[in-house]
Image: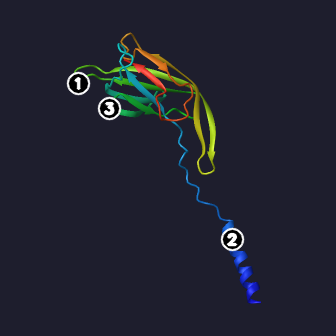
Amino acid sequence: MNKIHLLILILVALLAFSACEKDDICVDGDTPLLVIRFYDVSDTTLVKTVPGLEVRGLFTPDSVLNTIPNASLDSIAIPLRVDSINTSFIFSEKLSDDDPVNNDTLLFTYSNKQVYISRACGYVANYENLSSSLTGDAANWIKKITIDTLLIANSISAHVKIYH
């Protein structure tokens, strides 16, 4: 009789532990950022730092969010909106304290594709058919924009080149 009780106890323990699932930890679940590299307009192979770069996201005409406060960078990674088909940013360059701030507004348009990663991560947004437009005046510091990758599925390599 003890052997039967022991066997039943082992079976119950196996059934109880087999119902447990492994911990769901999300390691692959980040929506990719738009990676932008800055290049010299006169030598298009030369990466060029933007002095006094500020990037602000535009949500509505009255709502602005500082994305990159004030830095000298040759590349940036910025988030695109997942709740819209476009995102606007104000890119500002200030060469020195004596020079005025030069603002250019960029509009990135795309289609949003939700991709299922796992139960722990859920869905992430990938962006397809990326395009851009530049608004400003004759004094734009951004001279040219090229899209290298129409699909944004990772934040590893540059998607957009900006020449200044």
CA separation in Å, label 3 and label 1: 13 Å
Report the side of 140 relative to 32 (left or right).
left
Instruction: Report which residue position mark 3 lands on.
Output: 70
Q: Quadrant of residue 113?
A: top right
Give the residue drawn at x 74%, y 86%: 3
Q: Secondary structure at mark 2?
A: helix
Sequence-first disc among 3 and 2: 2
Looking at numbered disc 2 in the image, what kind of residue is underneath it?
Answer: Ala
Q: Which numbered mark, 3 or 2, is in the foreground of this view?
A: 2
Q: Position of residue 2 (x, y in %)?
A: 73, 89
Sequence-first disc among 2 and 1: 2
Instruction: Report which residue position mark 2 lands on.
Output: 16
Q: Is residue 1 above or below residue 146?
A: below
Q: Is residue 16 above or below residue 58?
A: below
* Mark 3 residue crowding within 10 angstroms, few (<14) / some (14–19) / many (20+): some
Report the side of 100 relative to 61 (left or right).
left
Q: Which is more toward the observer, 49 or 11? A: 11
Q: Secondary structure at mark 1?
A: loop
